[in-house]
Amino acid sequence: DYCCYYYYYYYYYYYYYYYYYYYYYHYYYYYYCMYVCIMTGNQKLIWILWSSSNNFMCFPFRHF
């Protein structure tokens, strides 16, 4: 779950670009989320981003 919270941080900046490819690259989002989690490992930053983010997070991609 931590990686997904941190993934939202990246998705926020590329929202207008990835929004149109949501249904086509949902698998790519999931693995990218995992990749960011492994590279960073900063749970404190992830917790802060989770508490200050809106409903649109990485959870929808995890269920695919």
Image: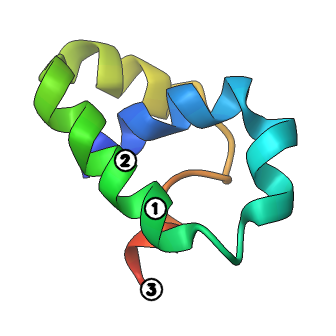
**Residue labelled with disc 2:** 32
Sequence-wise, which precedes: disc 3 or disc 1? 1
Q: Quadrant of residue 27?
A: bottom left
* Label of residue 28 in the image: 1
Q: Tell whether label 1 touches label 3 (CB within 8 Å).
A: no
Q: Quadrant of residue 37?
A: top left
Residue 8, compared with residue 28, is above or below; it is above
Q: Is residue 2 at least partly visible in the picture?
A: no
How many callouts does the rendering have?
3
* Helix, strand or loop at mark 1: helix
Residue 7, compared with residue 59, is above or below; it is above
Determine the residue positioned at 32% across, 25% down. Answer: 46
- Residue 56 rendering spot, x and y as whole percentages: 67, 53
- Crowding around mark 2 (Cα neighbors within 10 Å: few <14, some 14 to 19, many 20+) is some
**Residue labelled with disc 3:** 64
Residue 9, compared with residue 27, is above or below; it is above
Determine the residue positioned at 40% across, 18% down. Answer: 48
Distance, label 2 to label 3, CA atoms, is 14 Å
Determine the residue positioned at 39% across, 61% down. Answer: 30
Identify the residue at the far bottom of this view. 64
- Identity of the amino acid at label 2? Tyr
